[in-house]
Amino acid sequence: MTRSTRARFEGPLRSIGVVLRSGSPEINQVLDRLGAFCQQHGIDVVFEHGSAQGAPEGATIQAMDSGGLDLVVALGGDGTLLRAARSVIGAGVPVLGVNLGRLGFLTSLPADQLEWGLERILEEDAYLDFRFTLRTTVEGGSDGPYFALNDVVVHTHGAARVTPMNIEIGSDGSYEQAGSFSADGVILATPTGSTAYSMSAGGPIVAPEVECFVITPICPHSLAVRPLVVPANRDIRVTLLGSQVGHQLTADGQVVRALETHEAVVVRREREPVPLVRFSGQSFLNTLRRKLNWAAKPPERG
């Protein structure tokens, strides 16, 4: 699917869903402020099932993709935003990330600007940044599919040793051999996820507007294996060849499934993107410089 990657946020804003990280020390204060703002503006607030433990007593609990929500607010760090994004995949509900963590690369606001951001949304002075996601299945498996905004990782667990794997690229069930190699695993990342685990493993930084996947081997046992960028309209098939170590599938660093030898993992683009809320003046390059110090000017010598 091809569509514009940005659009104006258009109301109304009548109901907000909340996904939170309950371990944050300031979460209760932030929830009080959110509740007061929503009460003042006649906005209903509900909480996802995974946030029920940190929700106020008597709060409404429901699935974020069950309908009726105009916005989901993720209170936490990037991990909380990723969880919120997965909870609304296919529903088209915008996600606003409010950073209560350290880095907050994907989030849009620090906690002290929560009310300011909600005011901008009410005044339709915000826009939606559409990010495509991944749909992952295990061939022959009865579970899944697994969804991810950042990345899907097929990797070993337990003992530190490499495992052989095979990569194929294709579409509509027809694949072409890309190559086989031994490594600790392989990362299949979206452009959004290119600044996460893939970057740490030596993969390229990709602007969110680029329609592609990044295939990044993890510690490959060969100098000839390098990250590979492929079109987003392709399917990627990873087959495990080794039998001496355990393997697992991880989506966005949070969803885990054990894998057996010779099981094949198929990763493709999900049809509907997730809209992330952004504000005027915010851009990918600005965030890259500010959050990751990309190409920062070296300090002056004394």
Image (cartoon, rainbow, N blue to C red):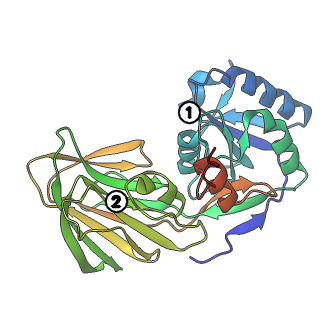
Q: In this figure, which residue is indicated by the disc labeled 1?
A: 49
Callout 2–callout 1 Cβ contact below 8 Å: no
- Amino acid at pointer 1: His
The residue nearer to you, when weighing 184 against 299, is 299
Quadrant position of residue 185: bottom left
In the image, is residue 87 above or below residue 135? above
Residue 137's disc number: 2
Quadrant position of residue 240: bottom left
| Side of 241 where 153 appears, left or right | right
Q: Residues within 10 Å of mark 1 (few under 14, many from 20)?
A: some
Q: Residue furthest top?
A: 57
Q: Residue 289 location in percent, x, y?
A: 64, 55
Whole-Å distance between the Cαs marked 2 and 1? 24 Å
Q: Residue 253 location in percent, x, y?
A: 42, 44
- Amino acid at pointer 2: Thr
| Side of 278 where 164 appears, left or right | left
| Side of 44 where 188 appears, left or right | left
